[in-house]
Image (spheres, rainbow, N blue to C red):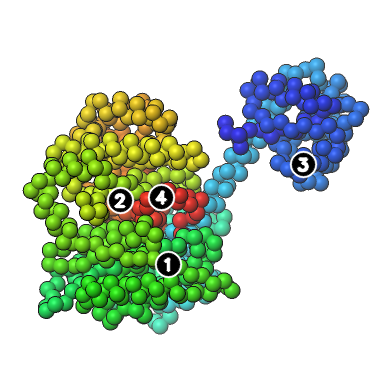
Amino acid sequence: MTKDQNLHLLVLEESSSDAESLANELRNAGHSIDLQFAGDLTALETGLTGHAPDIIICGSGPDLPDAASVKTALDRHAIDAPVIAIGDDAAEDSVVAARKGGITALVSYGRPDHLHVVFRREAGIVDLRRRLAAFTSTLQASEKRAHALIENSSDAIAYIHDGMHVYANRPYMDMFEISSLGDIEGIPVLDMISHSQRDTFREFLKHYHDAGAVENTLDIDCTNPGGEQFNTTMEFTPASMDGESCTQIIIRVNFGNNSELEKKIQTLSREDMLTGLWNRQYFMQRLEKEIVRETGGNQQRALIYLTLDNFKVIREEAGIASSDLVLCDIANLLNRERNAHDLLSRFGDYSFALLKTDTDMEKLQTTCEKLLKDIANHLTEVEGRTFTMTASIGICGINRHTTDAQKIISFADMACEVARTSGGNQCHVHSTVIDESFESEMEQDGDRIIRETIDHERFYLVYQPIVSLKCDKRQNYEVLLRITDAGGHVILPGQFLSIAERSGMAAEIDRWVIDKAFSTLAGYRKENDATFYIKISGANLSDALFPDWVGKRLKKYKLEGDAIVFEISEHAAIHNLNTTVDFISRMRSMKCRTAIEHFGVSDQAMQAMARIPADIFKIDGSLIERMVNEQDIQARVKSLAAVAGEKKARCIAERVDTPGTLALLWQYGFDAIQGYFVQEPAKELGYEFENEIV
């Protein structure tokens, strides 16, 4: 039991030693108690203005207030705490009189066993009240978070009660051309159904609300205010809104031959709802097409990745609504600076991606430096307050050798990270020439380069928060490795680590990462209850000596095992199934947990899930990114989450980079998310886990 869970006991006695004796007697009976002593009515009044007591014991004595006066003082302070009166007489008449006066129980000094029985009963009631209060608080926070997730969903979602709208998200209102939430509240849902099918809709709702109804989807024609009809599939789910039972409806449009409506809905699905810029999914589609397009002459293309340096501070100070206005202001500034053929996207929570299609690198750097000055000099006024900010920019050129959209984003993001961690308000160019040179060297002399990188420790760690969807405020970070070449340029770890594994040096890199992470965590946990998720390669998975080495490192840094989660890739786990099961068992003996990352991609995933006793399954980011637009991927992710729930394992979504997937993840029972929507990897710890995901 923590200190906050202790029973706060206030004892009125003639001396503090008498009060301490009573408290010690109860402690010896197994109760965890924080004692407060009061010797008279004045001291009692002072005690009631601080931490409200859970239980009061009122002794008897000529200078002590009687139990009735104590009860009156409690009522005056609106404190509902049981009062146990203790004295020399506990006869039946005295007990009845005490109960009539509002006293919970009357016990005798001579019968300590009676005091124990009464106190145990009241302590149990206090514990039940605390549990109920915690449950109520969690429920309210969960409903608040669910509301935020649904508001950010790309699906059209509404809540109805007695056939009337009580809430609808932005996509739903866009579908029916409704401008504000106030315009839809109280409107019958029947108004959205075509006249010819309203009887069908009424009949469905009647049977849906019948006990035992199992059908929860309906194909129905809807109509908008202009009289335009379109076919939809509606999905119905029991829900609650502000404590009232209601029904959640998700609407998906079946376009058929309605090309005009399809075009309108597709445009809405491509836009970021807050800024009006293109969203991440559409930007990635365009980027993939752009990088394979042939260009003529000296035309050059590049990707600019921009992150606002101090946006989190502004959000904390100004609140979500005001910070959203600041974000829109910056989006408008960026939009004014782009050319007609450029493509601008809100790529993350406070990050933007700009695809330049006709430029050169020298001109582009000048443009980016001007853009940084414009942002730094820009003032945004919200409710009488003025906000300023700076940004960091990463640039990656696109050439005929660069044909992977995800790599281009990663290169630009890393360049932006270099700019930000170097102090911010600057830009950094990622050189694909250096990448090509490095890859060529790796192919020719990979072992030597890896050996030199290890010997010279050209590594550093960054940390990405893993945030709960279930109101768990505990701090969780994934530890990620960054590598630099001899010239100090940051390179992607993918190819480096794959060659390191083939050459037998991956285990050595793992141990460097673990030792460095343990050292950092030991210092950080002095003031923060944090958990690190640390990747291990297949080499250490099958190393029989590795668990003992981990145990020694835990002792060296005085860390508890439950502060560590080791991550194994799905590929390594499935191809080393028996070894993985044995590894998980040995880690549990040290209280360390195990997660299977990048999970769900292989055809054997579901069967492997049944056999691997992992504590956590991290669903692969490629599935998370595709689930919004692909029904079969949705079904796969939903099944994986359901099986994880049955196994009592946590389920985490990787690479959540936009809010569009959040509502589905919450509905499917995911425990937590990780990705750029929460925060990009950073060198510093200190993410505000107390904040809501919105």
**Numbered badge on residue 390:** 1
Q: Is residue 335 visible?
A: yes
**Numbered badge on residue 309:** none
**Residue at horizontal 17 percent and vertical 57 percent from the top:** 435
Q: Nearer the viewer, residue 558 or 618?
A: 558
Q: Is residue 503 left or right of residue 60?
A: left
Mark 4 or mark 1, which is nearer the start of the sequence?
Answer: 1
Q: Nearer the viewer, residue 691 or 500?
A: 500
Q: Residues within 10 Å of mark 4 (few under 14, many from 20)?
A: few
Q: Is residue 133 left or right of residue 86?
A: left
Residue at the extreme right: 62
Q: Secondary structure at mark 4?
A: loop
Location of mark 2 (residue):
637
Three-letter amino acid code at the position of disc 1: Thr
Q: Residues within 10 Å of mark 1 (few under 14, many from 20)?
A: some
Location of mark 4 (residue):
684
Mark 3 or mark 2, which is nearer the start of the sequence?
Answer: 3
Q: CA distance from mark 2 to mark 4?
A: 32 Å
Residue 581 lies, in percent from the top left, at 26, 30
**Residue at horizontal 81 percent and vertical 31 percent from the top:** 12
Q: Secondary structure at mark 1?
A: loop
Q: Is residue 278 visible?
A: no
Q: CA distance from mark 4 to mark 3?
A: 43 Å
Residue 93 lies, in percent from the top left, at 87, 25
Location of mark 3 (residue):
48
Q: Quadrant of residue 632?
A: bottom left
Residue 550 lies, in percent from the top left, at 32, 29
Q: CA distance from mark 2 to mark 3?
A: 53 Å
